[in-house]
């Protein structure tokens, strides 16, 4: 129990604190509890992504690329640095309060002034050696929760940095997968482009032969030449696109393009994704960027509590125990012992304007954090809705394109049959082949778009991230 003088001083300090106007405790911020996804098509059978979501495509090449990117990406190293800095801030905040024990030892050699308060002739010496050895103890009482709020704010900032690190990893994983499947799509289209060039070359030779025989005008050959050049241009464009994607993959992995492992063309995987039925309620805990924004709100709220607690007096207890002597031979004797006990109360009476300004700034930061959180929730919902709707649209287009490819296949078969029966020459069959190759190319592009939308939806759903359960229930 505090002594009567200390209790009286504490009561007086509290009275003075009331006089400088402690602001009222602010109400807890009102945050969104669900993402606005009403009306977006969802499926009760749809599953949330796993942490290693890219493995669902069953492609060992992709697995190796993602793992290598995550292991050494510069972007993740930067995020890790921010996380480590946040963890260090927690330790700094924790060390700022509570108990502190310091040991000290010093020795000084001094000369007394001949004209000082006590002339040396009365002491019998001009020079003396002062020795001090002791322990100093200090304890700050956190009765108003200022230190506790500061520590909790630093912890929330560390949680936010950890969520941001997860968000950076998800962005990197999605970028690697999207770029890799873009390269695979280019390879599939390149195979079709080579067939198209071969078909156009045959048509060009037939056109030249018919012009030489006078069966067709010269413009027929010019048209065939232009069609062949266009097919070769498309092939060159796809080759360039594939090379650019390799450069992009190398950059994502943090290596030179020559260090990128050899990649083999593989068929694009099937896509069967949908929006989970509970996306509106569960999305906030599964998006790392939204979770980071929520942790920022919690940190700002704790900072506001600390700023309000600063209006109350700081109460501390200091103690000193040690030895002090001007005779070094007697430093460690019982007569050289020194002790001190100092309770202290500190209240910045003439600093009220600064405290109010700090409190106002903390409230503004809290409001900004709440606004940023609400914006992140709306943006997350927009992202999810966009990808879910895009997948449905692409799926509908793929079904219609499949019907066109089927019709084109039958037309090519009919043309080939007429050619075998001698009813027509090779031009009809080559034209049907060219048209079918164009339909297949369009189908591959739609497959690639569906795969890109699937990856984007996985990223929009958080990519397997799960926020801390304590945050989810706050």
Image (tube, rainbow, N blue to C red):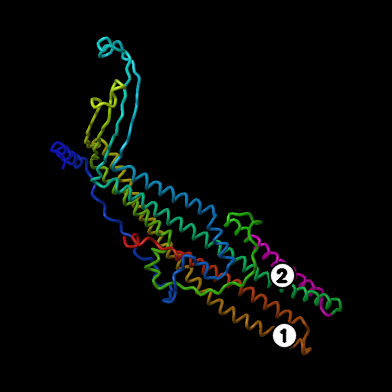
The C terminus appears in which quarter of the rendering?
bottom left
Percent coordinates x, y for residue 249 in the rendering = 60, 59
Instruction: Look at mark 1 in the image and give the residue it sits on.
Output: 415
Percent coordinates x, y for residue 389 in the rendering = 48, 71
In the rendered image, which quarter is residue 411 located in? Answer: bottom right
The N terminus appears in which quarter of the rendering?
top left
Instruction: Look at mark 2 in the image and give the residue it sits on.
Output: 231
> Which is more N-terminal, label 1 or label 2?
2
Query: Along the horizontal axis of the image, is 141 left or right of 262?
Result: left
What secondary structure predominates along the stretch shown in magenta?
Answer: helix
Q: Is residue 401 above or below residue 317?
A: below
Q: Is residue 11 above or below residue 36?
A: above
In the rendered image, which quarter is residue 328 located in? Answer: top left
Query: Along the horizontal axis of the image, is 193 left or right of 374?
Result: right
The span shown in magenta is 215-244
Percent coordinates x, y for residue 108 in the rendering = 35, 22
Q: Residues within 10 Å of mark 2 (few under 14, many from 20)?
A: many
| In magenta segment, residue 467 | no
Secondary structure under tag 1 reads helix
Judged from this view, the residue extending furthest toward the top is 121
Q: Residue at position x 62%, y 71% from top?
A: 266
- Tell me the number on the disc at residue 190: none
Percent coordinates x, y for residue 208 in the rendering = 82, 75
């Amino acid at each position: 129990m505090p002594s009567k003088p200390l209790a009286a001083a504490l009561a007086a300090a509290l009275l003075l604190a009331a006089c400088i106007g402690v602001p009222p405790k602010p109400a807890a911020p009102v945050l969104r509890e669900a993402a606005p996804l009403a009306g977006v098509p969802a499926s009760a059978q749809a599953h949330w992504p796993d942490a290693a979501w890219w493995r669902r495509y069953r492609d060992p090449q992709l697995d190796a690329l993602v793992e290598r990117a995550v292991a050494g990406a510069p972007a993740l190293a930067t995020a890790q640095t921010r996380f480590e800095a946040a963890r260090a801030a927690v330790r700094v905040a924790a060390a700022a309060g509570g108990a502190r024990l310091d040991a000290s030892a010093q020795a000084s050699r001094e000369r007394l002034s001949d004209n000082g308060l006590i002339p040396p002739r009365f002491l019998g010496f001009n020079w003396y050696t002062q020795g001090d050895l002791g322990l100093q103890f200090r304890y700050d009482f956190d009765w108003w929760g200022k230190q506790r709020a500061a520590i909790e704010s630093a912890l929330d900032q560390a949680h936010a940095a950890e969520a941001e690190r997860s968000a950076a990893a998800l962005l990197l994983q999605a970028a690697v997968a999207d770029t890799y499947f873009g390269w695979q799509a280019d390879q599939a289209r390149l195979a079709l482009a080579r067939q198209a060039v071969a078909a156009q070359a045959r048509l060009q030779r037939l056109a030249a032969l018919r012009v030489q025989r006078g069966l067709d005008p010269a413009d027929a050959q010019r048209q065939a030449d232009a069609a062949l050049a266009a097919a070769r241009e498309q092939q060159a464009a796809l080759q360039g696109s594939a090379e650019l994607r390799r450069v992009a993959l190398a950059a994502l992995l943090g290596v030179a393009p020559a260090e990128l492992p050899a990649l083999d063309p593989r068929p694009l995987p099937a896509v069967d994704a949908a929006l989970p039925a509970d996306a509106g309620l569960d999305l906030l805990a599964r998006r790392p960027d939204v979770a980071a924004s929520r942790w920022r709100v919690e940190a700002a709220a704790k900072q506001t509590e600390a700023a309000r607690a600063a209006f109350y007096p700081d109460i501390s207890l200091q103690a000193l125990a040690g030895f002090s002597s001007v005779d070094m031979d007697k430093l460690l004797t019982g007569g050289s012992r020194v002790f001190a006990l100092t309770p202290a109360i500190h209240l910045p009476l003439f600093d009220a304007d600064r405290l109010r300004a700090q409190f106002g700034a903390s409230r503004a930061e809290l409001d900004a954090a709440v606004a940023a959180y609400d914006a992140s929730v709306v943006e997350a919902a927009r992202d999810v809705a966009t990808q879910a709707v895009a997948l449905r649209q692409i799926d509908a287009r793929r079904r219609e394109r499949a019907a066109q490819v089927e019709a084109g296949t039958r037309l090519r078969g009919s043309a080939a049959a007429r050619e075998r029966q001698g009813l027509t020459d090779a031009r009809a069959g080559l034209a049907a082949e060219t048209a079918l190759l164009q339909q297949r190319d369009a189908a591959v592009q739609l497959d690639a778009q569906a795969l890109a939308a699937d990856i984007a939806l996985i990223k929009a759903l958080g990519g397997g991230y799960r926020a801390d359960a304590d945050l989810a229930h706050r």
